[in-house]
Amino acid sequence: MPISMAIIGASGAVGSTLAAQVLRSQLLEPCDRLQLVGHGSAASEGKLLGTRIDLLDAFDDERVEIEVVPKIIDVDADIVVIAAGVGLSLKRTNRRDVAIANRSIFEKIADECASRVPDALFIVVSNPVELGVDIFASRLERRRVFGMGAQQDSLRFARAIAKDLGISRRQVRASVLGEHGQSMVPLWSAVEVLASSPDVHRALDQLKEECARTPLRERVAAIQPLIIELVRAGEVPEAYEIARHALPDARIFVEPFITARSMHSTPNATSNATLQCIVAALACDHRRVHGQVLLEGEVLDLHGTCGVPITLSRDGWHPEPLDWLEACEKEMLLNAAASIRDFTLDVLSQPQPPELELEEATI
């Protein structure tokens, strides 16, 4: 059956990078369609028309249909990626500011998608991922909505471990659950190394032992203020050097912050994680990925949005059991779920800010 995929926010850094990665992956075939979705303004449509030609010049060998859709209400797709919204900036310096600004964008897109493509699979990329999932899942069938933040964090954790072990990330399986933010929960108990060398497995055991000596939150708190200070002072190489010497589970809390502050987004890593989720959904082969989803007690009796292991199909997500978690990991995940719930309720209780100028958003 032909695939129709839409990227809402295709004119932004993440959306345009994702479009290129999807086409480069040869996931789509000549009978398939990729929609680049705008927000109705002439400027947005003009940029997307240029993006379309640039993508065709690069990737038209497979003859995938690339279509510009000027208005969200005209989306017609089986898979819809939400990459629209604002990010951190001089005007919005923290996660809460971004959440308050993006709330109205999420609500507008969710309402229009609910009336147009209610049976699509929705992948929330925009931050805060948990807020986006909560809003979309309140307007659509919740099993058709997930956020890719936990997959991106899991890939970062796997890379950090692989770097310290001197092996490829392909040889490491790792999981990070909870929030796509400061309440994320890296799981050492879930780490698997596929290398056959006994030396690598001994090195992994040593890493785990070293991490267990001092609680994760203490290790993050010990380096985070200095890294923030260095980034604000423009001393990015020094900040990265401190992050490099942190243990893998702490490194993933600080290194993405440096990157995001330096680039204002992480388009390549975000697009790669999103593409992995799309591939999993289309393959429908029960491979495990990670995503923020709205739970109703399916996992550890959790209620609310939280990052957990899932499998995907074009019909939606299915949770994986977590009864194997160590007691300390379970406690951290429950605390993360509570933190997400408190943050989301706080944002949703705020008065609606003035509507964003459309050109401010990356939509």
Image (tube, helix red, strand yellow):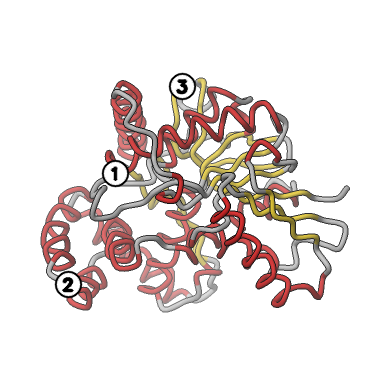
Amino acid, disc 2: Gly
Coordinates of residue 144 in the picture (x, y in percent): 64, 33
Q: Is residue 2 left or right of residue 169?
A: right
Residue 328 versus residue 248 in the image, above or below? above
Coordinates of residue 2 in the picture (x, y in percent): 85, 50
Q: Is residue 203 left or right of residue 267?
A: left
Residue 22 versus residue 356 in the image, above or below? below
Residue 45 versus residue 234 in the image, above or below? above
Residue position for label 1: 95
**Res. 234 mark:** 2
- Among the two numbered marks 3 and 2 on one chain, the one whose residue lies closer to the N terminus: 2
- Look at 37% across and 50% down and name the residue there: 186
- Look at 38% across and 67% down and name the residue there: 160
Looking at the rendering, which quadrant does residue 111 occupy?
top right
Circle 3 Cα neighbour tier, 10 Å, few/some/many (<14 / 14–19 / ≥20): few
Circle 2 Cα neighbour tier, 10 Å, few/some/many (<14 / 14–19 / ≥20): few
**Res. 301 mark:** 3
Amino acid, disc 3: Asp
The reply to whether discs 1 and 3 touch (Cβ–Cβ < 8 Å) is no
SS under mark 2: loop
| Camera-side residue of 50 and 156 | 50
SS under mark 1: helix
- Look at 46% across and 39% down and name the residue there: 307
Coordinates of residue 165 in the picture (x, y in percent): 39, 74
Mark 1–mark 3 Cα distance, whole angstroms, equals: 27 Å
- Among the two numbered marks 2 and 1 on one chain, the one whose residue lies closer to the N terminus: 1
